[in-house]
Amino acid sequence: MFIIKAGMTPNLRHFWFIVVLLVSLTAGRAVTLTGEEQQLANLLTTASGQQRNKGAMHLDERLVAVARARAMDMAKRDYFDHVNPDGNGPNYLVRAAGYALPATYSTDRKANSIESIGGGYMSAQECWDELLKSPPHRAHLLAQEPFFKDQTSYGIGHYYDPNSTYWHYWVIITAPPAPVSALTIAAPVAGARVTSETLSVRGSVSGGGMFSALQLRLDTPAGEGTWMNLSLPTASGVGQWTATVSGLLPGVNTIRVRTLDAKGAVALLTGCPVRLVILKPLTVSVDGAGRVTDGFAGTTNRALGLNYTISAMPAAGLIFDRWEGLPATPGRDFHRATQTFVMAEGLSLTAHFITNPFPALAANYGGLVGGEGAAPDESGGILLNVTAGGVFTGRLVFAGKTYPLLGRFNSDGDVSLNIARAGTTALSLALHLDVSGVVQAITGTVSDGTAVVDLRADRSGPTKAMRFTARIEPDAVNAPAMQGSGYATVAIRADGVVRVSGVLADGQPFASGTYFTGAGAFSLHIPLAGGGSVLRGSLEVAGEAMDGVLHYDTTAGESVHQTTGARYVPPAAGAPCVQFGGVNSGDVSLAGGGIASAMNHAFSIGANSRITLATPVPAGWNLNVNPANGRFAGTFVHPLGGVRKFSGVVSQKDGAGWGFFPGDGGGGSAILGAQ
């Protein structure tokens, strides 16, 4: 983070405004450093290795003003360099501030013979210690080269801005003592607001005999003016000068005065920024119950060309709708309550407020992006929670990646979001919530810059709490290789929140949360562990049954799985969770997956769903069922060797169970049924 620049070999108007203001604040009295600046000054003037005459070292207010302006300018314009973005270096800036450097010092605009800077250091001591580690800095600050020994005048500047890159900016300027001369503008006062296009200007100059000319220039917002000669007092003391300038334009105008030496070079330069204000009426009206920023309501006078910020605040039960009358500018959203605008003649604004429609729309919403038939890289899922204030949170799953969502619908129910993606283009998300309540859904589009994909998220709401167990059947195309069934357990809460978990027949586990919608269905779009695979689709609930299709996208391709489920009710204490063929006994059958002939074994299910395998029990076999969710699991010895695990779910409605086991040449099926 820390960068050091050695000094050895805002726009400009903004910079001179800072310099002139700082000089004007200290004119006529001794300059006072801040605590941080004083610490750095003490280190400079008391250093044991200091080669300058310590008794001759003194603080110069003009060098302090330039050093402070340099530190502030680097922070505000977010750069770190001896040469500012306008192409001006320390030699030029010090001379332009009215401090005369020796004629032998370079006059190149980028030249630096006087400055060291440090960025990012939290204290003066840390800055000093780090600067001295750099040979060029050490040579400058301790005058270890003859060139610097007569630089006994100095200025220190420090500026802190937590919104800048380096936070702390430190500037040390040293220079030979300047000749006794000064150039000031006494009136108008720097930073003054004026209402006339013509101004009387007066000031003073000392050491007039040292100069060949005294000149004045007016710079307006339209550009730089032309230097004109003034009468130069030649007395050895302080001489007064006066001038009249005209042609000021609305905005910041800068009056500049300079002296030239015998060779025509700039010796002293000072400036005085003033703002020409032309007031015109601004009318702000309110439609509906609400208010605007204090001082703006009704008709007030505002300065042409200036930026103003105004906010609209609704009364209880209402929301801000839109601004009317604002100039249409790129990126302006008239539905934003806070607006910044440039004052123009004839401007009239109205803030519109309407009854808040969102309390009736506050709910969870869930659905799919691209629909069930979309290609994997153009599909996804979306889950949103909308509050009574129109704020939403949630997540978007698109092309296998998950992105958090946060935003606010405007009064029309619209919102647009840009979602950054690492290493590729951002996603553009446009959502619309029907504020009339007729369409109980959020619709919109997702675009990756090339394709535009539709989305729909239906509203969820209170429902009957239910549990289901579901069989995920093998794809008919892949059935010869994958004969087993995946499975899932589904819990639908009374508030419409759905929790789904299960295992696909290739052993891939999955789990997700979603919402049960008013359409009697819920959507799934689940990126699976390891990346590159997605499980997606919709399941509908009708009474005690559940049915739908799930798409399983992997790097090897897509498979389609019919999924059927039935209501599952955990049994009362002491009762079995399922009966097979109406009795408390059944048969487990294992087939496929390298088993040449199906393997069957009888069992009984008793109190608390405890399963007992018929004797004799083959070595390595066991079977149990979890009555809380209907999942079963067991082990057996595969004919080709090794103990294998199998698992699945039971269906209370069908009196059966389906699952799978990993096998050779593809998974095999595990079925529980009647004997």
Image (tube, rainbow, N blue to C red):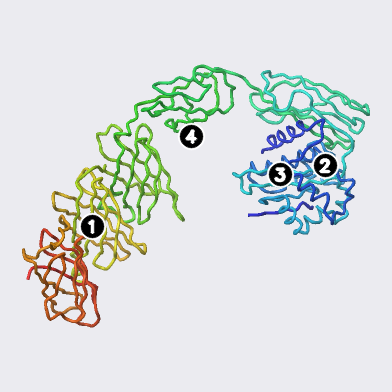
Instruction: Give the class, few, some or many, for how many residues have Cα within 10 Å of label 1's Cα (few <14, many ≥20).
Output: many
The earlier-in-sequence mark between 1 and 3 is 3
Q: Position of residue 517 (x, y in %)?
A: 24, 45
Give the residue number, with chain letter if any, for mark 4: 330
User: Residue type at mark 1?
Assistant: Leu
Q: Which residue lies under the disc numbered 3?
A: 158
Q: Secondary structure at mark 1?
A: strand
Asked whether residue 478 appears in the rendered view, the answer is no
Give the mark, 1 or 4, whose residue is nearer the N terminus.
4
Q: Earlier in the sequence, mark 1 or mark 2?
A: 2
Give the amino acid type for the residue marked by disc 2 in the picture: Leu
Q: Nearer the viewer, mark 1 or mark 3?
A: 3
The answer to whether residue 140 is above or below residue 348 is below
In the structure shown, which secondary structural element does the residue marked by tag 3 occupy? strand
Q: Is residue 365 visible?
A: yes
Q: Is residue 5 left or right of residue 611?
A: right
Residue picked out by circle 1 = 550
Q: Residues within 10 Å of mark 3 (few under 14, many from 20)?
A: many
Quarter-of-image position of residue 90: top right
Which amino acid lies under the numbered mark 3 shown in the image of this protein? His
Secondary structure beneath label 2: strand
Q: Earlier in the sequence, mark 4 or mark 2?
A: 2
Residue 237: x, y in percent? Answer: 92, 28
**Pointer 2: what residue?**
59
Relative to 449, is 571 on the left or the right?
left
Q: Quadrant of the N terminus?
A: bottom right
Nearer-N-terminus badge (3/4)? 3
